[in-house]
Image (tube, helix red, strand yellow):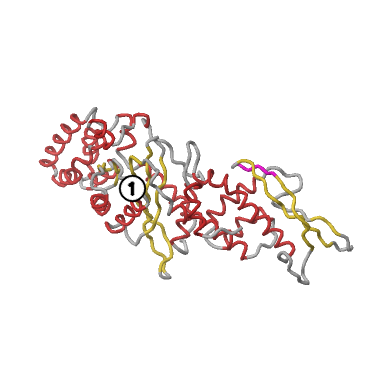
Amino acid sequence: MHGTKAAAVKQSKSLLVVGQGQDLLTKALQERVNGFLQEFVISEADAFLNALSYQRTSSRQGYRHGTVSREITTSLGKTTLDRPRVKVFTDDGRLGEWQSSLLPRYGRRSHAVDATLMGLYFGGVNTRKVSKALRPLFKGSPLSKSAISRIIVRIREYFDAWRERDLSSEDIRYLYLDGTYVPMRCGNKVTKLPILAVIGVRASGEKVLLDLDTRGEESEEAWKGILQGLARRGLQQPELAIIDGNPGLSNALGKVWPKTERQRCIVHKLRNLESHAPKRLREEVKADFHTIVYADDLSSARFAYDRVFKKWKKRWEPVARSLAEAGEELLTFYSYPSTQWKSLRTTNAVERLNGEFKRRTKTQGSFPTESSVLVVLFGLVASGMVRLRKIPGYKDMPPRRQEKLERSV
């Protein structure tokens, strides 16, 4: 009934690979929802009886007598489970039939199940919040702490399995990498620590969350650990990485995947350029920068780059120095299909993810542990509440460089 962490990891390859048009949690729960719901309904029966199977206590409220199969429908599809049958001791000495609040006698669709399955990801930080998430299901019925703990363990085992899944079968062409800071309790003190996220783009154009982890700081060593972990799990060297201006991330990429091209996010770079200019010149800086990153082709972009650099080297040198710092990495996207330029010149894909993280954690205050925040944030993507859409122009995705070389030999 209760899978071990090793079993969860063993099943991760089959359960955690996203298919066409399906989000991660939907596919996994379609296969495992029976186990979750079975856990809930048995825990509800245990709580009502105030006794486990074959346990003799003076406070027992009745006794089990088999099970009945029930088919219910959630937003994840149909599932069949065995509802415990329970005879209830009534005040007049007769025996009645217990009714599950999760599965009422004639109910065939449970909106409460949908809400609870999703709520577990966001209420699963501690047992008190899990109890609140389960309250609509059990309608005030007592639920033991051990039952709640078992549910939390299952969710975290699933997350741990996802983090260790084999990536060797993934054909990831592009990576988006960025971090965001979330308050969490560390050493009895609330501190904002970075959550580092990696989103991959498959050859089919689909975006997929590859890793999510927290570190003490957004440094070269921190990012190198993330990238080495992806490589250890079999991820092939991607063609392109879209990054912000963090020097630690850039250095880590150069050491782990030196042949991966880098595209600097034009939004981050524009903010940096504007920060070096007096307010009265910022609109002019922006207009000049746009002539570089919104040119018709690479040749025109390079011509614009040279013109803008020379202009600001004379007019206000800090802007020119900032532009030179990014250099050719501002223009990498021009070497890819023009239908993909909009997606490849910014880190907006991961920025939108970070924005959702901040919105969802704003009312949380702080998280008690790093694992609790990771499970909750992962749940946003896994549940489909935050959707990762295909990039435009994915049909123009070129073959990998090595494939090109092999065909030319």
- Residue 213, magenta (yes or no): no
The one nearer the camera, 145 or 157, is 157
Percent x, y for residue 176?
A: 34, 44
Q: Main secondary structure of the magenta part?
A: strand
Percent x, y for residue 97?
A: 81, 55
Under mark 1, the amino acid is Leu
Q: Secondary structure at mark 1?
A: strand
Pick the quarter of the image with the N terminus.
bottom right
Pick the quarter of the image with the C terminus.
top left
Q: Residue furthest bottom?
A: 58
Percent x, y for residue 156?
A: 51, 58
Q: Label 1: which residue?
A: 177
- Residue 74, magenta (yes or no): yes
Residue 252 placement, left or right of 95: left
The one nearer the camera, 90 or 274, is 90
Number of disc labels:
1
Q: Residue furthest top?
A: 296
Q: Is residue 12 above or below residue 294?
A: below
At 21% across and 34% down in the image, what residue appears?
292
Percent x, y for residue 260?
A: 26, 44
Q: Is residue 400 above or below residue 368?
A: above
At 63% across and 43% down in the image, what residue appears?
74
Q: Is residue 142 above or below residue 318?
A: below
Extent of the magenta region: 71-75
For disc 1, the neighbor class at 10 Å (few under 14, some 14 to 19, many from 20) is: many
Q: Residue furthest front?
A: 409
Residue 104 placement, left or right of 1: right
Q: Residue furthest left?
A: 314
Residue 90 placement, left or right of 337: right
